[in-house]
Each structure stands twice: as C-alpha cells, then as structure tokens.
Image: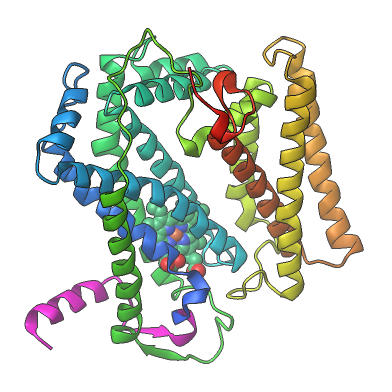
Amino acid sequence: MSSSRKSITDLVLHLHPKRVSAETLRLTLSWGLGGMATVLAGMLFITGVMLLLAYQPTIDQAYESVLVLTREIPFGRWVRNIHHWSANLLAAVAVLHMVRVVLTGGFGPGRRLNWVIGLVLLVLLLAANFTGYLLPWDQLAYWAVTICTSMLGYIPLCGHWLETLFRGGDEIGPATLANFFVLHAALLPGLMLILSLWHFWLVRRAGGLVRRKEDGPSDAVPTSPNLLMREAAVGLSLIAFVLVLAMVADAPLLEQANPGMSPNPAKAPWYFQGFQELLLHLHPSFAIFVWPLLAFLALICLPFARGTALTPGVWFGSHQGRLLAILAILAGAGLALSAILLDGLLLFSTPVNAANTWIARGLFPTVALIVLMAGAYVVLVRKLGYSRAEAVMAGVLAVLAVLIVCTVVGVWFRGPEMLLSWPWAQTGA
Ligand code: HEM
C-alpha cells in the first residue's frame, strides 16, 4: 500500500473500530443513510467556506455579491448550487435516517442518548438550512423568512419576544441578516460539528450498528477493506450525484428583496411547509406550537418508555410489522388528505384566527387526535396482538405520513391566496 493511501486509511480508521460485525455490512440494514448525511454535511462545510470568500453579509451588498458569484466568478454558480442541493438533500436524508433507526429498532438500550443527540442534530440542521435561506436577500428569501418568523409570534407567552429576537427588531432588516449570518456561518455549524462527533463516538461505544444478535457470537471482520470500501462506494456515488445535479439544476435566485411587494402566495421553505399547511386548518398556537411540541416531546421520550424499540436489526420487527407499517402509512396519508380536502371544500370560508376557533380548531382536533391514536394503540396491542413496539412504530409512521401529505400539498397544490389548485394551473400574482 502506498504511504499516502495508508495515511488516508489510518485517518478514516480512527473513526471506526479495527473490526466490525459482518452483519452490519449489509447495505439494506442502514442504506448508508448516516454516512450519506455525514458526506453531505462535509460538502456543505467545504462549499460554505468557499462561498464566504465572495459573499457580503449586508443588505446593500448581499444580493449583488450573489449575482457576482453566480455570473462572474469561475465555478461560482456551481459551488452555490452544490451548497444548495447538499443542504436540501441533507434535510431529507436525515429524516430518512431517523426513520431507518425507528424501523430497525436502533434506539433501544445503549443507543438512547444517541437518539436524543440525533434529534437535536435534526433541529440544528433545519435551523442551519433556514438561516441560510435569507442570505441571498432576494424576494424568495425575504418573504419566506417573514412568514416563518411571524409564525414564531403565535407561540404562547414568549412568541413575540422570540420573533423580535430572531429578527433583531420588529422588522426583517440589517439586524436580521447579521443574526442569520452569524448563526448560519459560525454558531450552528460549530454546534453541529461537536454533536456529530459525539454522535459517531456513541455509535462506536454501542459496538457499531444495531444487529440481530448483539450479545451473540462475534462475526467480526476487518474494517479495512470491508467497511471502508462500502463507505467509499456510497460516499463517492453520492458526491458524483450532487456534482451532476448542481450542473443541471440552479439554486433559485429571484429579484432583490422588496419589503413593499409580497409574492402571492408567500411560502415558507419546503421543509416548513407542512406546518404552514397546518396553519391553514388549525388555530395558529396549535399549528405552530402545541402540535410540533407534542410530536417532538413524544419522539424524545420514545426510547425511555418500556418496550418501544423493535427487534434490533430486523426491519419492521417482523413480517406482520411490515404489513402494519404499510397500513399505518396509508391510514395517516388518507386521514390527512381527507381532512385537507374537507376543510378546503366545506370550511375554508371560516376565518381561522377568530377567537372561537381556539376550541373548534385547536382543542377539539387535538383531543380527537390523541383519543384516536390512544384508541388505535389499545386495539393494536390488546385486541390484535401486536407488540408495543409495533404499535409505536405504526404511530410514528402515521404521523410522518400526515406531515409528508401536508408538505406535498403545501409545496405543489397551494396557489394564490393559498387556495387549493393544480400545480399546472398556478400562475402566481
Ligand atoms: C446531521 C445529521 C446526522 C448525521 C451526520 C448522522 C450520522 C450517523 C452515522 C454515520 C451513523 C452510523 C450508522 C449509519 O450510517 O446509519 C448514525 C447512527 C445513528 N443515528 Fe444518526 N446522524 C444524523 C442524524 C440523526 C437523527 C436525526 C437521528 C434520530 C433522531 C439519529 C439517530 C441515530 C442513532 C440512534 C444511531 C445508532 C443506530 C444504530 O446503531 O443502528 N441520527 N448516525
């Protein structure tokens, strides 16, 4: 082996044990999603540093500096596109990685803390994505950030304070850009780096990925080349994919931000459009605060309740678990779609923020949903003989399906005035 090749292998081996279980080498166990998230985060970091060489974080110069970057600096547009696509793919890959962890029983004993760290990483990476959204200071950025920071205002008690804190005042302006720039380019990447290293170390301390016979006889094989070659194959394919995608698809850049002219519809970034969709149907405090908080708390507590993790290393826990998973996804998606259509066709004329909607569009749907989920859990476990873990998995997948349907409707099926419309019929205003 050449000395340079040996140095690279030695460096990568520092992140791994010398030997790994052969069972965990199956691509179908993890689909390499955690590794893909790592590669995307690396690409973000490298292209982010390159963008900093051209970007000017003031409202007079930000837009102009992005124009210069994309039109005049060699490869500037490509670097910006790589940064854009890596960030968006990372959001999707991290959610898929989380779902993989749930479906292979990856948050059981020994991995509980890592689950919580993963959730914090997810919040941080969404925040990093969102703070980067404002930096080009174009119409898309300005109005998406206006929508999202005003959503914060609906949080009970401290909402207005949070809104002012993030904006750096009452309006989106120079202070907002300065705040977002520091968060995006320094604070959030720094925190993510520290937490990621902790995350990797905890995987190693747990003895590697989840597998069927965690205490059984060891089937260990040398990490190099067995694991390293597989990681290289996944990582290099992903890098090639992003590089090509960034050549053919440009990151959006509209006209310079104009606080006096709001686009119609004004939408949040895609990863928050599920919540923007909820906002059309529920009382704002419930859409922005109560429902996301309940979901997040449930996810945090998941590993700490008894019997919530599926059989380690077995997708869906069992064959009947797989069927249940499909049913849960169909039920969640069907429920969300019917609720959206019913509300759109029958009730959309009712103003959502009127005082009486606190009960009709806040408390009532929340209690109804909790009762429905608790009822489904009892039926699955007591009457149909599913395990607690399988019932919990069904709940997580149903909620995820609701969020995905809300996001898809928000991204493609909301036109001017946020009314339901076919994507090809939307002209905007
Ligand atoms: C920036 C985001 C993230 C990165 C870079 C990352 C990276 C990784 C890597 C490299 C692994 C090793 C196994 C694999 O490839 O799947 C892993 C495992 C794990 N991750 Fe993540 N992760 C991230 C986000 C998350 C999230 C959002 C969660 C869940 C809330 C999570 C929970 C876990 C758990 C519990 C394990 C151990 C699972 C097992 O042993 O099978 N991670 N992560």
Query: Where residue 313 sits: x, y (%)?
Result: 58, 75
Residue 257 quadrant: top left
Query: Where residue 37 sits: x, y (%)?
Result: 38, 58
**Vertical order, 405 against 410 (above or below):** below
**Colour scheme in use:** rainbow
Q: Which residue appears farthest toward the right when viewing the image?
A: 383
Question: Residue 289, can we see it?
Answer: no
**Vertical order, 375 against 314 (above or below):** above
- Residue 18 belongs to the span the image colors magenta: yes
Q: Which residue appears farthest toward the front when viewing the image?
A: 425
Q: Nearer the viewer, residue 392 or 284?
A: 284
Magenta residue span: 1-24
Q: Nearer the viewer, residue 343 or 3?
A: 343
Residue 69 quadrant: top left
User: Position of 178 compared to 352: left or right?
Assistant: left
Q: How many marks?
A: 0
Judged from the image, the quadrant occupied by ligand 1 is bottom left
User: Position of 74 compared to 277: left or right?
Assistant: left
| Residue beneath the point at 27% across and 22% down | 177
Q: Nearer the viewer, residue 417 or 294?
A: 417
Question: Residue 279, can we see it?
Answer: yes
Query: Where residue 228 sits: x, y (%)?
Result: 30, 78
User: Position of 127 compared to 391: left or right?
Assistant: left
- Residue 135 belongs to the span the image colors magenta: no
| Residue beneath the point at 43% across and 68% down | 32
Q: Quadrant of the N terminus?
A: bottom left
**Vertical order, 108 against 373 (above or below):** below
**Vertical order, 21 against 179 (above or below):** below
| Residue beneath the point at 65% across and 38% down | 294
Query: Where residue 38 sits: x, y (%)?
Result: 34, 59
Q: Nearer the viewer, residue 215 or 259?
A: 259
| Residue beneath the point at 15% across and 42% down | 76
